[in-house]
Amino acid sequence: MTNLNTKPNINNPDGFYAELLELHEHLDKDQSDALNARLILILANHIGDRKVLRQAFKIAQLANTSNKE
């Protein structure tokens, strides 16, 4: 089983974030949400490993609940 890598692993993360923001420019909320959903499905398909994807679900869910406190 492969474990989800949660350590920084993106070359030039600031550049990546800028590209992601640029991708969403001029989109309304619904279009932006749909784009994010497509990105999630494309990347999930690339990962392919359901155990890794479940780990990502859990990490994202925990981050979401800790942000509400």
Image: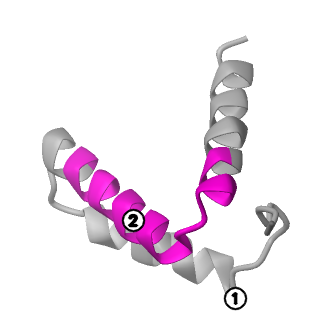
Amino acid type at circle 1 is Asn
Q: Residues within 10 Å of mark 2 (few under 14, many from 20)?
A: few
Q: Where in the figure is residue 59, as x and y percent of width and height?
A: 72, 41
Question: What's the CA distance linking mark 1 and mark 2?
Answer: 17 Å
**Residue pointed to by mark 2:** 21
Residue 6 position (above or below residue 10): above
Give the main secondary structure, helix, strand or loop, of the magenta stretch: helix
**56 left or right of 40?**
right
Residue 62 located left or right of residue 15: right
Front in this rendered view, residue 20 or 4: 4
Q: Secondary structure beneath disc 2?
A: helix
- Image height check: is 66 above or below 4? above
| Residue 26 placement: quadrant | bottom left
Q: Dot 1 lies on which element?
A: loop
38 sits left or right of 14 in the view: left
Residue found at x 79% / y 69%: 2
Query: Residue sitting at 39 percent across and 65 percent down?
Result: 21
Q: Report the residue marked by disc 1.
A: 11
Q: Which residues are magenta?
A: 33-54
Q: Residue furthest bottom?
A: 11
* Residue 3 x/y as whole percent: 82, 63
Q: Position of residue 11 (x, y in %)?
A: 69, 88
Mark 1 Cα within 10 Å, few/some/many (few <14, many 20+)? few
Q: Position of residue 19 (x, y in %)?
A: 42, 77
